Amino acid sequence: MSYHIDMEDAAANEPVLLSKHSKNLLRFLHLLPARMASHDNTRSTIVFFAVCGLDVLNALHLIPPQMRQDIINWIYGGLVVPRSNEKQCGGFMGCRAMVPQTDDAELQECVRAYQWGHLAMTYTSVAVLATLGDDLTRLDRKNIVAGVAAVQRPDGSFSACIDGSESDMRFVYCAATICHMLDYWGDVNKETMYQFIMRSLRYDYGFSQELEGEAHGGTTFCALAALELSGQLHRLDTCTVERLKRWLIFRQVDGFQGRPNKPVDTCYSFWIGASLRILNAFELTDYAKNREYIMTTQDKLVGGFAKWPQSTPDPFHTYLGLCGLAFTGEPGLSDVMPSLNISMAAYAHLKQLHESWRLKGDENTTGASPYSIATTPELLDAAMEQQMKMCDDSETSTSPLISAQ
Amino acid sequence: MSDSSDEEYLGTDWLPYSERSEWADVKPLPQDDGPNPVVAIAYSPKFREVFDYFRAIIASREKTWRALELTTDALRLNPANYTVWQYRRDILRELDANLKNELDYLTEVIGQNAKNYQVWHHRRVIVEMLNDASQELELTQNALDIDAKNYHAWQHRQWAIRTFNLYDDELPFVDRLICEDQRNNSAWNQRFFVLKHLGFTPEVIQRELVYTMNRIRIIKGNESAWNYLVGVLRQSEDGLLSSYPEVLEFSEELYNAGNRSPYLLAFLIDVYQEQALQDGANEQLARKVYTLCDDMATKHDVIRRKYWQYVAANLKSQLSSKSAK
């Protein structure tokens, strides 16, 4: 018994190895080993985990100014802008597999037919740009949102891209993040989107990936965040909200699981935690137990978090583990905006951009939703202050570049 | 994040495309990653070459049998490349290829990549093109034999059943899985999916309640079964948890016999709460809820103590606002 208590104390006192996590995430921005080639199509999500993770760690200054510019330029390099006579495939690509090195205009033209924006890559790309303080002026927001509307299905769900993709709750979420971040909804049909989300609510009050599939923590986050970002969360009646809270609260074992009777996994400290934050019920969870589990998945040698204890850490679980800890107020970590899954500082920067677009009467904002997510003024002020500080740091940083593995 | 390993799939007798005479007419097209790329992957020579040739055939719009073979190599190296899958489909259409062969190929690929979105999507499109889902139940059953909670397999299976009306033999399949592992939440969900389609008539509800209570008797602390029980009760005409009194009786029996499974207690809390709110301010029922919430918070479900305090407080405020009216 005393042994058990000692173990708990040990986990409770375990420090989050902030600087090791920063170094770990920085490494992923550089050269990746060949064994990661199966992640070729989602390179911009790796940038997202690394950059947003460094942001949550208050360590963006570790990215040298030149590299920050390289990241921004590389992200913009994936932007697809369709011509007026082409399919509405605007958005960001997550990789360059379909970009050939050739001066032959005819060859380039042929490959162009297979260059499409991808909703998950567009979401993560815009999030990275916002986090790095970019002003998004190189984006044609109308064009990108036209690409989002073009992949909406008659049932209200979304595909990832104009051709060759499944449609489900993940891309409903990505569509909502993109429109919210760009403060423009264009021809996106929020009503059918809402209908699709509600048709995917299951008998146990979690949301499934699509329709009558099994309720799942990740897709429940996608559904709730999409409702919040599209200003439709209030459409859920009290009874439904209470039952959703029940399903979510019951996912806590020590850390969180994604489905009933499944093992706990670090990433659900974010997916379930963020869902509960959206419903203002996160404070009903057991913070200490949650933290205790996440800490058992921390790699003390090379930094990073894994899904399970003794597993290999990766950027996905590292970032979501950090966000999960941030929700419990872990010292040294910035607060995270749950539904966009970026820092409050990055969100404050976005709100500033929205304000300036509206003041300018930017024609892109015509028809933009006046809805905005309630954040206390104090919180936004603090976040903005931090954002300014971060920008200052970046100018004067002398941190050495962490060398690639 | 899983890693890819070329060697595992492509044997050691690999002949580079540059050394293949039948490919001598194609000039490979390297990738343009921009001047200062980030998250650059140190592709293996094999990966680099296969994709250089793939870019070349896309650029020349070549849709031939050798191009199809090339996509097979490219997809072995990166099954997540959705553009390669799309181009493969374009080639198959152009060649008017026998799609039965494609199904065989996919059965093999799914065997190796049972949790890859693109592979399952490709399967769905090919089945649609063939308008033949006769192999889908077996395919997904094989995947579920390996991992009975594989979300992709269940999703594909539901799609096939829904689209091609294959509900007939699903209930015995689900029953087998629940027997093998009563905690298989995916199987319970599938049971609900099938019965919802067939219709939750009073007879079906009755039968399902008995089925579920029998399962709970075996494992009392099984959240999946309790959730299913509540879900079925809510399908009744009035949607009330007390609409089938035998369920409350069954639960109270378990409680009186000393069982304190959090799922049992949560169910009792829900039933009493529902009744308390229905009967106006029924003090006795409300007090039962408060006592149970307190027991949960202090003894049986301590990790959720703040939640159970919240549930009790919530009922209190609902009842007081009700009596105020």
Image: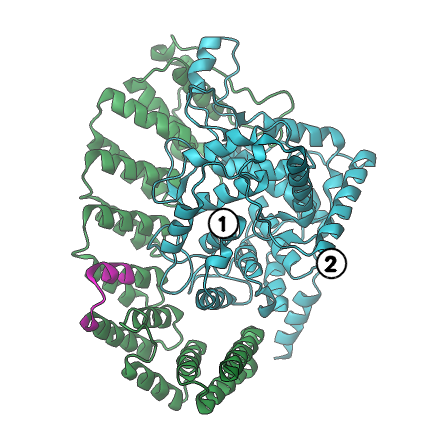
Residue position for label 2:
A331
Measuring from the top left, give residue A218's x and y in whole percent.
47, 53
In the image, what residue type sits under mark 2?
Pro
| Residue drawn at the location 24% of the way across and 64% of the way down | B175
Chain of the residue that carries numbered disc 1 in the rendered image: A
Which residues lie in the magenta part? B191-203
Residue position for label 1:
A226
Which shade is chain B? green
> Quick check: is B148 in the magenta stretch?
no
Whether residue A46 appears in this view of the structure is: no
In this view, the residue in front, A305 or B172, is B172
> Quick check: is B199 in the magenta stretch?
yes
| Residue drawn at the location 31% of the way across and 53% of the way down | B144
Which shade is chain A? cyan
Q: Is the N terminus of chain A in the top left, top right, bottom left or bottom right quadrant? A: bottom right
In the image, what residue type sits under mark 1?
Ala
